[in-house]
Amino acid sequence: MAPEHSRFRLREMMKGLMCSHGYGYGVAVIVVLALSFGASAEQLSSRECENLGFTGLALCSDCNTLSEYVKDKELVSDCFKCCTEDSNDATTKVTYAGAVLEVCMRKLVFYPEVVSFIEEEKDQFPSVKVQYVFNSPPKLTMLDDAGQHKETIRIDNWKREHILQFLREKLKPLAAD
């Protein structure tokens, strides 16, 4: 089976799990998968992981849950190569120097919450730049201190309040001049 096809199947299966059983169930499934497979020592770059279909701040426990429902060992292995080790506070400790909100201008009509954020709230975050890219779904690309791409998080279904909360928690405050 082609890797692209198996990754597409994974994304569709995970969407089905999340929709039919709720997000908590999907996370629990991923945790169990991580326990059964263990984390891989080899890590892929965030760009490689995004190309494989793994975006966002996935924890390795998510990959454990995935392994229970997906028998494609290569796919589960890729998940572990793209995950962040679990800790008590793993996702809340990660902060970024800036972000790029990428979206297709033609598709903005389908994302009123993103439009609302751009028009009414974006100025609160000087380290966030808006970039219009043809056919791109709404996503935040998080940047390190050197301006390098670190993580990509899809925000298609986020409410304006969620975007605000995420950026307040994840962006480092700008240094006063």
Image: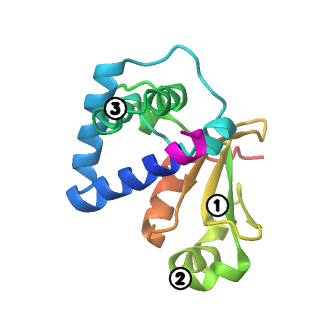
- Residue furthest to the top in view is 41
Residue to which mark 3 is pinned: 67
Per the model, the C-alpha gap separating discs 3 and 1 is 38 Å
Looking at the rendered structure, the kind of residue marked 3 is: Ser
Q: Which residues are magenta?
A: 1-6
Q: Residue at x 29, y 53 (%)?
A: 17
Q: Could you tell me if the residues under marks 3 and 2 are in contact, i.e. CB atoms within 8 Å?
A: no
Across and down, in percent, residue 98 comes to: 68, 48
Q: Residue at x 71, y 54 (%)?
A: 127
User: Residue 134 lies in what quarter of the image?
Assistant: bottom right
Between discs 2 and 1, the one toward the N terminus: 2
Q: Secondary structure at mark 1?
A: loop
Disc 2 versus disc 1: nearer the observer: 2
Looking at the rendered structure, the kind of residue marked 1 is: Phe
Looking at the rendered structure, the kind of residue marked 2 is: Pro
Tell which of 27 and 79 is nearer to you. 79
Evaluate whether residue 52 shows in this view: yes
Residue to which mark 1 is pinned: 125
Residue to which mark 2 is pinned: 112
Evaluate whether residue 56 shows in this view: no
Crowd tier of the residue under label 2, counting other residues whose Cα lies within 10 Å: few below 14, some 14–19, many 20 or above? some
